[in-house]
Amino acid sequence: MAVTMVDRLGFRPPSTSTATVLRSIPPHFLSSSARTALLMLPTRLGPFATFSNSGSWFSLSCDLQSTKAFAVPRRSLMSLILSSTIFSQTETNLAFAQPSVEFREYIDTFDGYSFDYPKNWIQVRGANADIFFRDPFVLDENLSVEVSSPSSSKYKSVEDLGPPEAAGKAVLRQYLTEFMSTRLGVKRESSILSTSSRIAEDGKMYYQIEVNIKSFASNNELAVMPEDRVVRLEWDRRYLSVLGVENNQLYELRLQVPENVFVEEENDLRKVMESFRVNKLTA
């Protein structure tokens, strides 16, 4: 038996079990189109239902002659249909309806720098940085700015650090020093992913450094036998730095983000990096 359905045609009312399942799902979990698709299902389905979607046509083929040994329980089949419908519709809505990230500008007129950051990030005080913002949901994703002391630094240009490759090695050393741990069984793996320089719209040169650091630790560092000291990955993060010089000071914008989050938010994070500016202080 083959049943072919079209969006604009009428269909038989759903069976009691289908309607019951639909009533049990909170309204916000199903869009109107997904609910309509479920209502269009026939009252009885045989095993091995197959679906195809081409344009506005939605075809359902059921082999009623399949043997009982390979039959799929009705409840399991209904769950499969609901899951595929819900998640496919959710992915579609996310792709086309999810709003883009909004940014807000932060300007420090006292120290002389500015940047854009995601509007929903919150400022955290007492974080041992000139300024610190954090994603309220992904706590390992944050942004900070470091400024060298005006009394001990006499930078004229970011090129005083050497080429970008040399600056990248210095940045990585600084990160590893800050993350140094006295715990037993801790091991860090690090690498410089990229180093580059660019001239921004303000005419100043900026260095951009990207590094990756992984932290490994034993689940039982005090165990006597080696097989009992299993090493596991604690965290895997990417660190993005933008370096600029103005007012005889070195400015560094730092972004920290888990590697799996970076894959999803790379474009937004690069917008933050590109927005960083160092500004001349007026007397």
Image: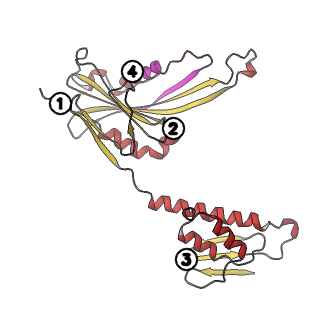
Q: Name the residue under label 1.
A: 280
Dot 4 crowding, Cα within 10 Å, few <14, some 14–19, many 20+: few
As for residue 265 lying within the magenta part, the answer is no
Mark 3 or mark 4, which is nearer the start of the sequence? 3
Q: Quadrant of the N terminus?
A: bottom right
Q: Name the residue under label 2.
A: 259
Q: Where is residue 281 in the image (x, y as percent from the top left)?
A: 17, 29
Q: Position of residue 144 (x, y in %)?
A: 37, 31
* Element on which disc 1 rests: loop
> What distance separates the C-alpha of mark 2 from that of mark 1?
35 Å
Q: Which residues are the magenta region?
A: 168-197
Amino acid, disc 3: Ser
* Element on which disc 2 rests: helix
Amino acid, disc 2: Glu
Q: Which residue is drawn at 39% across and 50% down?
A: 101
Dot 2 crowding, Cα within 10 Å, few <14, some 14–19, many 20+: some
Dot 3 crowding, Cα within 10 Å, few <14, some 14–19, many 20+: few
Q: In which quarter of the image is the C terminus?
A: top left
Q: Which of marks 4 and 2 is in front?
A: 2
Mark 2 or mark 3, which is nearer the start of the sequence? 3
Mark 1 or mark 2, which is nearer the start of the sequence? 2
Q: Mark 4 points at which residue?
A: 170
* Element on which disc 3 rests: loop
> What distance separates the C-alpha of mark 4 from that of mark 1?
25 Å
Can you tell which quarter of the image residue 35 is in?
bottom right
- From the viewer's side, name the closer residue of 131 and 245: 131
Taking 187 as reference, is 230 left or right?
A: right
Relative to 176, say whether 270 is above or below. below
